[in-house]
Amino acid sequence: MEKEKTVKSTKEEIEMIRSSVKSLCERFPESYWRETDEKKEYPEEFIKALTEEGWLSVLIPEEYGGAGLGLTEAGVILEEINRSGGNAGAGHAQMYTMGAILRHGNEDQKQRYLPKIASGELRLQAFGITEPTAGSDTTSITTTAVRKGDKYIVNGQKIWISRTEHSDLMLLLARTTPKEKAAKKTDGLSLFLLDMKDQKENITIRPIETMINHATTEVFFENTEIPVENLIGEEGKGFRYVLSGMNAERILIASESVGDGKYFVDRSVQYANEREVFNRPIGQNQGVQFPIAESYMDIEASKLMRDKAAEMFDAGENCGAEANMAKYLASEATWKAANAAMTTYGGYGFATEYNIERKFREARLFIVAPVTNNLVVSYVAQHVLGLPRSF
């Protein structure tokens, strides 16, 4: 796999990134996020600010208008957003979808799209893979892309595709060869860059109401046209291209979980020190202390795995196991921290004004998405430990 050149930041530069992102986030207090959550609104102002300061284009090489940095730096950005009380999910896809274009796109595609994505003129936030009848079994997707002359005609359906309504472009995985005619089940899948604004008459988007504000939708394609020049890499090799993007996605999701976990610990420590019952701070009680301290240790351990996975990804090494383990460990540690925070706050944790319940809901997502933790355990059992395949 071709590796894009990235600039490795020093510890001082990493801390500068943290500090800068934290300063930006201070302009968007938790009241802002609480309001967008209540209204189910997309945080346009926040995404605009992130774009203008260049944080969403850090993975794009400098020659195309980005910073040319790596997944290590990208992870720090998302971690800090979530630690501040925000929700980086509104912008994270633009980071992990970069991998497919950077590693497998041609020069023409990079010149046409990357500078506009970096500047914010175009927004790439949608990743069209999951389907109602396939779920995590990506090789069983049935959305088709049939070539006719200089275009591919797409028909089918996708589900759980987030930010479709707030994106100009979508990375779309579709079948160009029927599964039964492919040499291997992973063959015959192709990856495309779809201009959704150009094809809006041939795309139907239906929002899905969920327990968190994640702008998730169901998408229907009816004779949707994609120019041949928007095929990423080779026809039929899309599944392999998607895998590298999935590793990036898992590492970045782990970063968001680490940020959420630190948020819960920060808030729990603050409240446990301030809240007095029976003439003493509740943090003096080991029943309150221990869950917070245990969560902190678990989060710090998961952060180390996240760091290792990001470093391997940036070095062009195979990091499938590390990326999956980072996502699993961080999401589980953070869910533990979320419950510790709820217990620490007691009844106040359920009050929207304290923000714990919103972050509690958001943290739960990463146990099941973008891949359920049960599948991560299965992956490690089979591919790392050499145990028999369970499905």
Image (cartoon, rainbow, N blue to C red):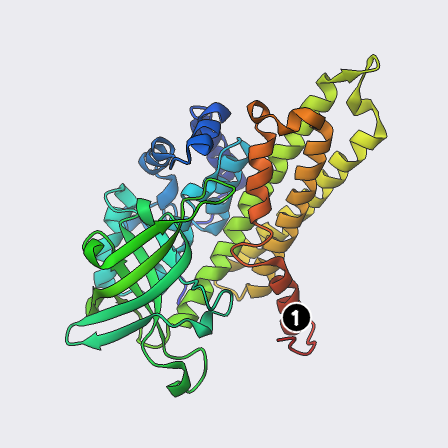
Which residue sits at x=53%, y=55%? 250
User: Would you say 265 lies left or right of 99 here?
Assistant: right
Q: Where residue 199 appears, x then y in whole percent?
A: 20, 57
Can you see residue 178?
Answer: yes
Q: Where residue 268 appears, x then y in whole percent?
A: 68, 28
Vertical placement of residue 186 versus 244, above or below: below
User: Would you say 219 lies left or right of 132 here?
Assistant: left
Q: Where residue 6 appears, x then y in whole percent?
A: 41, 53
Vertical placement of residue 107 versus 238, above or below: above
User: Would you say 286 lies left or right of 59 here?
Assistant: right
Question: What residue would you read off at disc 1?
Answer: 384
- Quarter holding the C terminus is bottom right
Which residue sits at x=80%, y=35%? 290
Which residue sits at x=73%, y=20%? 273
Q: Nearer the viewer, residue 294 or 359?
A: 359
Dot 1: within a 10 Å radius of its alpha carbon, few (fewer than 14), some, or many (20 or more) residues?
few
Describe the element under mark 1 as helix, strand or loop.
helix
Tell me the amino acid under the disc marked 1: Val
Can you see residue 20?
Answer: no
Q: Where residue 137 appears, x then y in whole percent?
A: 50, 70
Residue at the extreme left of the image, as rendered:
149
Q: Quadrant of residue 101?
A: bottom left
Q: Quadrant of residue 143?
A: bottom left
- Quarter holding the N terminus is bottom left
Q: Nearer the viewer, residue 54 or 247?
A: 247
User: Would you say 239 lies left or right of 357 here?
Assistant: left
Which residue sits at x=73%, y=29%? 344
Vertical placement of residue 380 versus 8, above or below: below
Vertical placement of residue 278 versus 218, above or below: above
Tell how many labels. 1
Q: Quadrant of residue 20?
A: top left
